[in-house]
Amino acid sequence: MKILLIGCDGQVAWELRRTLACLGETVALGRRSTPVLDLADSNSIRETIRQTRPGLIVNAAAYTAVDKAEQESDLAFRINAVAPGILAEEALAIGAGLVHYSTDYVFPGDSRRPYREDDAVGPQNTYGRSKLAGEEAIRHVGVPHFILRTAWVYGRRGQNFLLTMLRLMRERECVRIVDDQLGAPTWSRLIAEATALMIAESTSHGRFEPGDRQGTYHLSCAGQTSWFGFACRIRDQALRLGLLPESAARLEPIPSSDYPTPARRPNYSVLSNEKLFDRFGLALPDWDQALRFCLEEFRH
């Protein structure tokens, strides 16, 4: 099976290039690849898929600048909402399937328990609204698909909270971090590994055939913490592994009101992964354990 991986430079896509390799020929394209695949350009999308003719499209690209999206809503919607619909249309036309990543930010953040896939949505910012529109476009087309909602993604590449904290803890004496937003930090490698397992379970005779298991799934690490709690564990584990000097910055918890941003964030965006376990027998580890696994790789 030929797999078209979109977003070859992103932190999840970088891991997917390895995990998908055993499932078939993988063609990884993005804005910096040759040829170029630009999700903001509908013609680029259609031409690439018609020339590549994959059996499965894995879309790991998105407009993810949450605050900037408030000023660039048109671009955010072209990439996060319009493009997934076009991917779905083109995939359906050639008999291919589609795997697409979404976000915890489709929810309003007012729950007192982990959000399930069928809970009411209510994005609080432009980024979340654009990602929700992308989900709806895929479902409307009716292509065989997985929509995988994940959260608080980090890894060794790209721009993410882990790398930012490691840098700031080396540069500053004190770092102030929001302590009243709760979620589940999720390592990009685990997302890629779980995705590959789901695809393998849904492939028969070289065709992506999810059958009655197609649909939307939550894919995040277990447990929950705040951004401050996440930062504290980064500091503790990085010090233990010798990745930070003993003079690493101290951390100070603050409320969201002390760190205003253009885009409103949900106060609670923990996802329930029960459906993933029920349908595929997959359960990502606790976020703290996953963080340790990730940081241990920094030593090599």
Image (cartoon, helix red, strand yellow):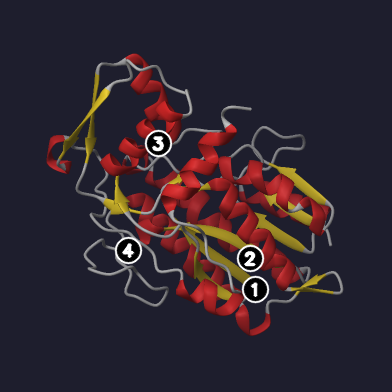
* Amino acid under disc 1: Val
Q: Residues within 10 Å of mark 4 (few under 14, many from 20)?
A: many
Which element is circle 3 on? helix
Marker disc for residue 88: 2
Q: CA distance from mark 4 to mark 3?
A: 21 Å
Nearest-to-viewer mark from 4 and 3:
3
Q: Are marks 2 and 1 in contact (CB under 8 Å)?
A: yes
- Give the residue drawn at x 36%, y 31%: 235
Q: CA distance from mark 2 to mark 4?
A: 23 Å
- Give the residue drawn at x 80%, y 59%: 23
Image vertical order of residue 252 relative to residue 194, above or below? above
> Which of disc 2 and disc 3 is earlier in sequence?
2
Marker disc for residue 107: 4
Nearest-to-viewer mark from 3 and 1:
3
Nearest-to-viewer mark from 3 and 2:
3
Q: Residues within 10 Å of mark 1 (few under 14, many from 20)?
A: many
* Amino acid under disc 3: Phe
Q: CA distance from mark 3 to mark 1?
A: 34 Å
Residue 122: horizontal and vertical position, in percent? 29, 65
> Which of disc 4 and disc 2 is earlier in sequence?
2
- Give the residue drawn at x 68%, y 43%: 37
- Give the residue drawn at x 34%, y 22%: 169
* Amino acid under disc 4: Phe
Residue 158: horizontal and vertical position, in percent? 53, 33
Dot 3 corresponds to which residue? 161
